[in-house]
Image (cartoon, grey):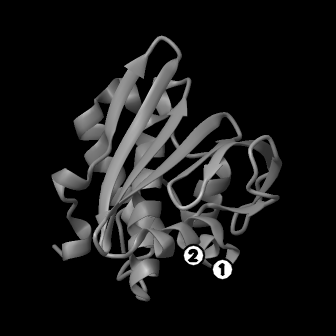
Amino acid sequence: MSDWQQTETADLGVLERSSDGVTLRFTRRLPHPAAKVWRALTEPEHLATWFPTTVEGDLAPGATLRYNFRDMDLPGFDGTVVACDPPRLLEFQWGDERLRFELTPDGQQTLLSFLASFAEVGRAARDAAGWHTCLDVLGYDLAGETPPWPQDDRWRIVHADYVRVLGPEAATIGPPAEWEETYGPANAEPR
């Protein structure tokens, strides 16, 4: 088994439940200054590497954002900037999810806390695997490296880990049909 086919338990996101829905919480220590991580979270050339959609619009609280998928035939959608305090906090509505990125400088490193909040617990394993993979790719982008795996293969491996850890209740909603049309069945063996 390759290193990329294994997931460090410490890197797995945590599922938090509330009366409003669920939140996935991820924490990553990145060996880069906060200003560099901020650029990777906000500049189109970096977002094109790791974020699942384009992000069009101003990063000002209350501003409307437009998101379009690059690789799948899915309709675009709108969102709103909730908070933006460079280089510490970025929060926005991404369709029916609220995404929050908090950066805490630690010398030449940055502690990234990422939260994704939504209503349906049944999609938690799917979304956790997706965001986990995105954060992995973000780490490679920051290092100026190419990931050693196709993103869809990494998602499949990490998804199995999240189904195991979060349980069957968190895995009742799978990827959209358009994802499977583009990348193959969700349960396919990684290449």
Frontmost residue, 166 versus 38: 38
| In contact (CB < 8 Å): disc 1 and disc 2 | yes
The residue that appears at 23% across and 37% down in the rendered structure is: 165
- Position of 152 with respect to 163 (left or right) is right
Q: Quadrant of residue 7?
A: bottom left
Give the residue number, with chain letter if any, for mark 2. Answer: 49
Can see residue 50? Answer: no
- Residue 104 vs 62, above or below: the answer is below
Q: CA distance from mark 1 to mark 2?
A: 7 Å
In the image, residue 32 lies at what x, y percent?
Answer: 36, 76
In the image, residue 122 lies at what x, y percent?
Answer: 46, 27
Quarter of the image with the N terminus in it? bottom left
Frontmost residue, 81 versus 150: 81
Q: Secondary structure at mark 1?
A: helix
In the image, residue 26 lies at what x, y percent?
Answer: 35, 47
Quarter of the image with the C terminus in it? bottom left
- Which residue type carries mark 1? Glu
- Which residue type carries mark 2? Thr
- Position of 158 with respect to 117 (left or right) is left
| Residue 45 badge | 1
The residue that appears at 49% across and 72% down in the rendered structure is: 35
The residue that appears at 27% across and 49% down in the rendered structure is: 12
Crowding near the residue tagged with mark 2, few <14, some 14–19, many ≥20 C-alpha atoms within 10 Å: some
- Position of 61 with respect to 174 (left or right) is right
- Residue 123 vs 70, above or below: the answer is above
Can see residue 17? Answer: yes
